Image (spheres, helix red, strand yellow):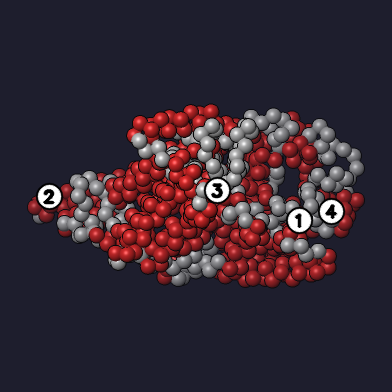
Amino acid sequence: MANAERSGRPTEAFGATAVGRTRTRLRVACLGLWLIVAALAARQVTVVLGTPRGERLTDLETWVGPNGVLHVNGSLYDSTRFTGTPFGGLVLKPLTRSAEQALGWGWTFGTLLLVVALGLIAARALPQPIGRRTALLAAPVAIGLLMLSLPVRNTLWLGQTSIIPVLLVLLGCFTARGQRTSGLLIGVAAALQPTLLLFTPLLWFTGRRRAALATGATFAACTGLAWTVMPHDSYRYWVHHMAGVGLGGPADDLANQSLHGALLRLGLTGPLEVALFLTLGAAVAVLALRRAVRCFGDGQLLLAVAITGCAAIAVSPTAWQHQLLWVLLAIVGRAGRRASDRYVWPVTVVLVMTLPTRMMLPDMQALDPLRTNLVLLAALAAATAVPFLSRTSPHYRSPLPTEYAPAASARFKHVPLVPYLRRVLTRPNLLLDLLLIRITYAAYAQVRLAATGGSNSAGRAEAEENGRQILGLERALHIDVEHWANRTVVTIDRLRDFFDYYYTSMHFIVPLTVLAVLYWRRPADYRWARSALGFATLLALVGFWLYPLAPPRLMPTLGFVDTVHGVQDFSQPDYGTLTSLTNQYAAMPSLHFGWSLWCGVVIAVLARRWWIKALGMLHPLLTASSIVATGNHWVLDAAGGAVVVGAGFALTYVLSGPRASTARPRRASYDSRYLSTARIRRL
């Protein structure tokens, strides 16, 4: 027995130590998230209160400022600047003087407290049971996402009250004791935002009929009180403006993310548009309520509330940006049976609610209907289309696992540096990858443009001086062939047309084609190649930032001909075409050559036939010739592109090891050590 005790104690101590370490890591992670939340809150306060009065809290100034509509005798809607319900004006009028005195600090901090309360309630409303990690991290993650979301940022900047109805509904659904109190809170929210009356049938069909009756009675009482006190304003809001349509701006404004606004932007007007709006709105409401009732019966009450709120956005005559928080709450829904699909919906929602739409979709006329209605489409998807999993589904808690390659032996002792980045054999979710590629490219374009202060003229002198340095170095190395190549191509029309086309078209066509083929035919190699390309692009951004460089075509007195963009007017401080789209001084390193070299290396490594390998390596050769002959890059720019691509492949190898197809199983001791560590992490 003594021997058994001695043999058992180290194991128990090891297990206790492992669990203690896991708990410590969770606490540290939780503390870090709360610090991030505090930093976000401080930044919001600094941005809002650091802006001169008259440029911040403009909506609040419109209502309760010295000349606000709540001070003026007569109708609230004379100037159409007040967009709330008559009941909202009735509630705000007694608070006018105190709000005016606290305008700024008090309102901003009060809004932040409402956001914190909203995040805490949403975190507590997650369907049970939840793990310890989720319980600790849910609240700071929820509050942080709310702080970053466009509706909250817009609310803080303008001084809106749109968080209050959402908070009242969540209080009524998750914290109120008794159905009457719950209905009272939701009824007041509906009196402030009428389309929230959709929660009345949700309450009714989920068995909370007293709450539903209380909601309807409270809404009727509040609206009736406002009608008694302010009959003229009530008539103008409910009858003349049809529940606020046209207040605060035209209904077809891009900020109106409702079905009514989308139909108007598509060019529909008159009785046809009204009939179509009512028909589609009724269909969305019915489908959303059916889904919400099923989610409620499944124990996912927060998702049911979010679905109903998304339907309220769609059927509202006007749903301005600061009223769209319901879409963010729909992030709690789980969609996708595979583990690789599980993150598609939450990532999509977070990106839609935190980034401008121009970063989500390219600025192309054909995509205007999608880009201008992106939040509405997300709300409609949450309300009617996304296949949220039931808690009874076997995939709800245990999605289909991802296939991994066996652990690989590397040539160096400490490779991979991040051993948990195992090689995935299956292809990633296409929608998620397209979203991430688009966001990455938009961020790349923004950083590239900002590298010289946001415009080409800001760094012109430095870029031209760096250009003279590069030319001097090339002359010392006897590789300054740019002028000869450019003049030769200019004199041969067919050669000029070929290189112009190759420069403008193949830069995107070939890399996208390689990625598409790898995604479809070689998913494991797709991840490896994509990572290398991403690292190379990030390193190139550092080069753009640190070393702005004028290409040959933008160097005065050197006599280069810009065969692609046309004649340049060097007398202008900001010259050259495409200056509003990209930074023309981001020449070192050349990503034209870098991306083409990446394509050549990937094809040469993965292709089986020699002639395909040869074609792959021919692409960077033709690209190098085109960028030099058209006057868009120096020879050393291509060398810089080769350096960042090589560094990209090296970083991929160092961080995650060899490719899956070349992986050899490690020793059994490593596998057992890895499995035991994985079990400890799950604790």
Residue furthest front in the image: 491
Measure how far apart labels 2 and 1 are at the Cα level.
77 Å
Taking depth in this image into account, of 222 and 237 the one nearest to the observer is: 237
Residue of label 4:
237
Which quarter shows the C terminus?
bottom left
- Judged by depth in the image, the label closer to the viewer, 2 or 1, is 1
The secondary structure type at the circle numbered 2 is: helix
Answer above or below: position of 104 versus 208. Answer: above
Q: How far apart are marks 4 and 2 (CA)?
A: 80 Å
Q: Which mark is residue 6?
A: 2
Lower position in the chain sequence, tag 4 or tag 2: 2
Q: Residue at x 9, y 51 (%)?
A: 2
Residue at disc 3, secondary structure:
loop
Q: Which of marks 2 and 3 is in front?
A: 3
Cβ atoms at labels 1 and 3 below 8 Å apart: no
Q: Which residue is drawn at 37% across and 38% down?
A: 479
Whole-angstrom CA distance, mark 2 to mark 3, is 80 Å
Sequence-first disc among 2 and 3: 2
Given this view, does label 4 or label 3 mark the residue nearer the observer? 3
Type of amino acid under label 3: Val
- Residue tagged 1: 252
- Numbered tag placed on residue 564 in the rendering: 3
| Mark 4 residue type | Tyr
User: Do the numbered discs 2 and 1 sit on residues whose CB atoms are within 8 Å?
Assistant: no
